[in-house]
Image (spheres, grey):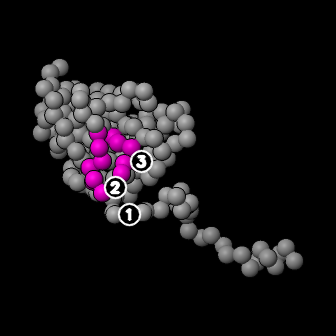
Amino acid sequence: MLTAAIALAQVQTAPITEPRGSEHEAAGPPIAKGAAAIRKVHTKCMTFLNVNADALFTPHRWTLNADAAETLDVLGPMIIRLGHHPVKIFAETSAADSDSENRDVSHRRALTVRTWLINHGFAPADTVIGEFNPDKPVAPPGKTIVSPSSERPRNNGVVKVIVNACH
């Protein structure tokens, strides 16, 4: 009887894409990509290029989505246009269940973006990855980081590329 049940079961022939739960299915308006996913903020010495992480990553993951290059191909030239200055990359997420998991996902996301930008010639090899600290969000003084798309709340985090022109 068990053999008959197994024979009737559908066999998985294609790769399983993760995550598979309904909590990760797209809801609401489409995710902004390309230039629409990037918010540029200037201060006296620094430029913050804040990228909606939804345009790059699936929640809880740090490997780039298949269409992440659409946004990174816009981000890279923005960094180049700012000149040869020190670059620091932070990633923040609050999608995980614990600060420890958020720290791990955030670090890996920053490393992934740093590697992509360096490999494509958009960031210097000495680009630094900032440490995630849930108690000290990285934002320009007096500024709050918001989602590039006001219709869609940021729930997957942000990747921040900080270019320091005064250093």
- The picture places residue 9, in percent across and down from the top left corner, at 72, 75
- Marks 1/2 in contact by CB < 8 Å: the verdict is yes
| 3 or 2: mark nearer the eye | 2
- The picture places residue 6, in percent across and down from the top left corner, at 77, 74
**C-alpha gap between disc 1 and disc 2:** 7 Å
Rate crowding at label 3 as few (under 14), some (14 to 19) or many (20 or more) other CA atoms within 10 Å: many
Residue 24 seen: yes
Q: Which residues are magenta?
A: 145-159
Q: Which residue is mark 2?
A: 152
Q: Nearer the viewer, residue 101 or 65?
A: 101
Which element type, helix, strand or loop, lies under badge 2?
A: loop
Residue 159: which disc?
A: none
Residue 63 colored in magenta in the image? no
- The picture places residue 99, in percent across and down from the top left corner, at 52, 33
Q: Main secondary structure of the magenta part?
A: loop
Q: Which residue is mark 1?
A: 28
The amino acid type of the residue labelled 2 equals Arg
Rate crowding at label 1 as few (under 14), some (14 to 19) or many (20 or more) other CA atoms within 10 Å: few
**C-alpha gap between disc 3 and disc 1:** 14 Å
Q: Which residue is mark 3?
A: 156
Q: Residue furthest top?
A: 167
The amino acid type of the residue labelled 3 equals Asn
